Amino acid sequence: MTTRPFDDDRPPLLGPRKRRDGDGSRRRSDPNATVPEAEFISYYGHNVVQPPPWEWPIPAYLFLGGLAAGSGLVAAGGHFTGRPRLRRRGRYAAIGAAALGGAALAKDLGRPERVLNMFRTVKLTSPMSVGTWILTGFGACTGAAVGLELLRPRLRSGSGLAGAAGVVDGLASAGSAFFAPPLAAYTAVLLADTAAPTWHESYRELPFVFVSSALAAGTGLSMITTPTAETRGPVRQLAVLGAACELGIGELMTRRLGELAEPFEEPPAKRWHQVARVLTVVGAVGAAVVGGTRVGAALSGAALIGGSLATRFAVFHAGITSAKDPRYTVRPQRARAAAAAAEGRGVTQPGGEWPR
């Protein structure tokens, strides 16, 4: 006696689906076919790829880490170019954003003491482990710089203590500038190291998108908090550069992703993606055209910060959507299998012969 494989009424992996011809037109199913054509649905109610159980604190952490990195870089630039207010306010912004980012990460972990477990080892093959130590180095350098800012009024000019403080201040600024780009990029590497298809396949461009977005956010915040006398020139130019790179590299990323870029056009990522592009363009144009005025600089900076925030949420939701929909896992695998078969090699054994 034989039984049907799905007598328990659980849905099979494959079900009926209308296929399309090469020109995109819908092709009618063969009425004489005994096996229905396939569509991609879940297997026994489970996803092919398990989406991460992350909620809003994670994209908030991604944004705040980038804001801290951008502000730290701007503060270092202000230190080495003799802009004291830009240096001081950039340092305060950097340490504040880093602290809020740590709080968002601790909230996602559920138990804040779990953060301490990340300091037990150093694992170079783990983006989370490397990122933890990058954040630690950035926080230490920026914290030392902020401490010196608080002590600066009490140090008498020309004294030996003031001279030593100046050396430490320079080293702290250099350290913040050194750790800032990796701090902005490591979160993108962390996402690309997951199995979510859209995140995983964007490993080439996503770090550059995050670094550019962080630069735009950091310069945007400095345009709000610092008088225009110290944000003219390099700060506004960096704001335009960061926004332009974020838009350009992001467009290259979505074009290369092909089908895996579709989650950016599906809710809720679609709304965030549209808002990110609009605000980033507005911020860049405003920084270039009206950034020399106080009101124009503040509005442009706010738009750049909002665009950076929306970019993180768009990327976050696109990755979650791609993990939930089996199409974005199965179709690329089939395409790779077909390409490997055409080249006469195995899918999991590059250079080997395709099994016959």
Image (tube, grey):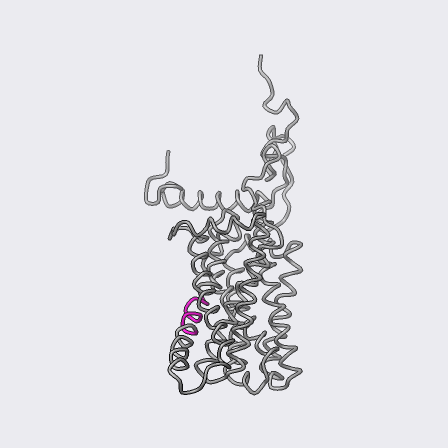
Rendered-image quadrant of the C terminus: top left
Q: In this rendering, would 48 be left or right of 336?
A: right
Q: Position of residue 253 (x, y in %)?
A: 51, 61
Q: Is residue 151 magenta?
A: no
Which residue is located at x 40 percent, y 85 percent?
Answer: 159
Which residue is located at x 63 percent, y 86 percent?
Answer: 293
Q: In this rendering, would 285 be left or right of 334?
A: right
Foreground residue among 137 and 188: 137
Q: In this rendering, would 100 be left or right of 202?
A: right
Which residue is located at x 54 percent, y 52 percent?
Answer: 260
Q: Residue furthest top?
A: 1
Q: Position of residue 296 (x, y in %)?
A: 65, 82
Give the image quarter of residue 29.
top right
Foreground residue among 184 and 15: 184
Q: In this rendering, would 167 be left or right of 92?
A: left
Q: Main secondary structure of the magenta part?
A: helix
Q: Is residue 175 magenta?
A: yes
Give the image quarter of residue 162.
bottom left
Rendered-image quadrant of the N terminus: top right
Q: How many marks?
A: 0
Residue 188, above or below 342: below
Give the image quarter of residue 243.
bottom right
Foreground residue among 65 and 34: 65
Residue 164, above or below 274: below
Start-end of magenta stretch? 173-181
Q: Position of residue 100 (x, y in %)?
A: 58, 62
Q: Position of residue 313 (x, y in %)?
A: 61, 59
